[in-house]
Amino acid sequence: MATATLPVTERENYLNKEYGIRSWLFTIDHKRIALLYLLSVTFFFFIGGLFALLIRLELLTPAGDLVQADTYNKLFTMHGMVMVFFFLIPVVPATLGNFLVPIMIGAKDLAFPRINLMSWYLYVIGGILIMHCMLTGGVDTGWTFYTPYSTAFTNTKIIEAGLAVFVAGFSSIFTGLNFIVTVHRMRAPGMTWGRLPLFIWANYATSIIMILGTPVVAITIILVAAERLFHLGIFDPKLGGDPLLFQHLFWFYSHPAVYIMILPSMGIISEIITCFSRKRIFGYKFVALSSVAIAVLGFLVWAHHMFVAGMSVYAALIFSFLSYMVAVPSAIKVFNWTATMYKGSISYTTPMLYAFGFLGLFTIGGLTGLFLASLGIDVHVTDTYFVVAHFHYIMVGGVLMGYLGGMHFWWPKISGRMYPEGWGRLAALIVFIGFNLTFFPQFILGYVGMPRRYWQYSPEFQVLNVLSTAGSTILGVGYLLPMIYFLWSMRYGKQAPDNPWNAAGLEWKTSSPPTTFNFDETPVVDFEAYDYENIKDTDDDGGAH
Amino acid sequence: MSEHSTSVGFYVMIFIILLLLTATTVGAAFINLGPLNPVIALGIATTKALLVVLFFMHVKGASEKMIQVVIMMGIFFLLLLLGLALADYGTRLWS
């Protein structure tokens, strides 16, 4: 019997090659490390989600009745820190990226497998630090650590939280370094830059940001610690420092960090839309290079977070203009995805539903970003719920929709099992409805003047807040469902063929799940990416080229 | 990579130069040179960074184009950070 026809349980693959906790904790297989990351980021997603739930429960009524003001400050701070640094930044690169980057380019592993494992350990150390910090008092500065409050006033655990972020930052630097070297050095014969899947381009661009941006936030955290511990005058005006310097340095990383989050999801969307439209991507080069353009332009826009903070009006004008510029490559992607679907043979599978969700929500998030980039409107809505709604449309509506779409798309490859399609579609619908019910009212709340980061509010804001809280519970159900049926499918799911979607790409030419070294023989690539015109529709074992 | 940069003694020498430059920074901090203070501190820091990049990171003598590209990118993004931040500091008092 040929290997490919053996049942999943009998074929040797990366999951059943070795057993036991040691085989996981000391693994250098990129696929196993991806699963370690998957477990860890899922854990932190639910911790961050728990904080979100408490925030929404507090905001159900105008009075501050569930928690004290100080506790509320800690809740939104820890929600932000956990979600940004321990979920959104690693979620796609470290899980799907780790799993797929080597396979998609026809390599056996990443260039530095041990550094890959070390990156996970650093993430875990950072995670333990942030958990310890949360359990022993937490932080109340907001995830942004703004000075001089963080260096001169608050008595909460700034140094420990900073250290956690610092350590986790190095894990993402390692991931970025690994991806860049792997893409440069380990592509299979024939896998030219012009044939790379767009998911690879997206992760490559992300890696550039990780490597260039993360050290800046690490240095900034050290400076905060130095001022807090040794009273060096860097940010505190009383000591001769400048608080806006902190914001410049912090946002130099933290705005591009938004692109660390969204770019890999954009890569996923490119894969899904081409596959389920059965069409070649419209404008491959533009979509690929727009990822790089976003990575570079993303570094030029940071001060739009500071328009009302007292910065120079003239510099604000420059940053406003540059912020508009970054919309161009993002729009190129959205238009090209739409053009790819035009006259395509579209199937409404779960990953495609998430891709549709991404298109709508990311567009709303992106366009409201333009509102915030324009100086006049920004003055009106800064620090209101409008901003909260805007970045959740990008980070949750964009990143998470892409991530969930990708998880469903590649789940057969990762686990060797199919998830239940009906439940998948239902969950995608619930997530979409829950998300919009949670965050759309916040646009209106912000526009009519409800400030963010307060635990009490005027009674006239209650109806919209109740809608938002109701939406968040629906959203919570939407997120729990995939976790349940993914776990269920690992035992009871239908066995996945090697290429259940009849998709292009090297990952579908290896077994599901893949063997430890991904391919029995190094593949030779003699076809363009997304060559769907030449893949027969009835072919279910890996694309006939 | 050139021969001399691989010997241990060479690295020790660079390390000692770095220590001396650190001592110079500390020493210069005790002398009031007015507007020259930051110029001297930044000058020494830049020299130290150059030494680390050129010798410890093996950039001097590296023939691969890719290494040059990576270094240029690092410098480019540093200039972006400094340039755009200075666009704020340089014009803040105008308004």
Image: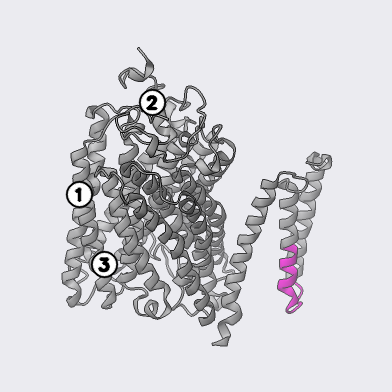
- Residue A505 as seen in the image, left or right of residue B26: left
Q: Which residue is rendered at x = 44% and y = 31% of the image?
A: A25
* Residue contact at pointers 3 and 2, CB within 8 angstroms: no
Indicate which label's residue lies in the foreground, 2 or 1.
Answer: 2
Q: Check residue B42 for magenta coloring.
A: yes
Q: Which residue is rendered at x = 62% and y = 68% of the image?
A: B82
Chain on which label 3 sits: A
Quarter of the rendering containing residue A435: bottom left
* Camera-side residue of A431 and A84: A431
Q: Mark 3 points at which residue?
A: A68
Q: Check residue A233 for magenta coloring.
A: no
* Camera-side residue of A326 and A12: A326
Report, in whole angstroms, how far the alpha carbon at label 2 lies from the one at label 1: 33 Å
Nearer-N-terminus badge (1/3): 3
Chain on which label 1 sits: A
**Secondary structure under the numbered disc 3 in the rendered image:** loop
| Labels 1 and 3 in the same subunit | yes
* Residue contact at pointers 1 and 3, CB within 8 angstroms: no
- Residue A207 as seen in the image, left or right of residue A511: right
Q: Which amino acid does label 2 sit on?
A: Ser
Query: Where does residue A98 sit, x and y in percent of width and height?
Result: 45, 39
Report, in whole angstroms, how far the alpha carbon at label 1 lies from the one at label 3: 27 Å
| Labels 3 and 2 in the same subunit | yes
Q: Name the residue under label 1.
A: A477
Tell me if mark 3 has few (under 14), some (14-19) or many (20+) residues whose alpha carbon lies within 10 angstroms of its own.
few
| Labels 2 and 1 in the same subunit | yes
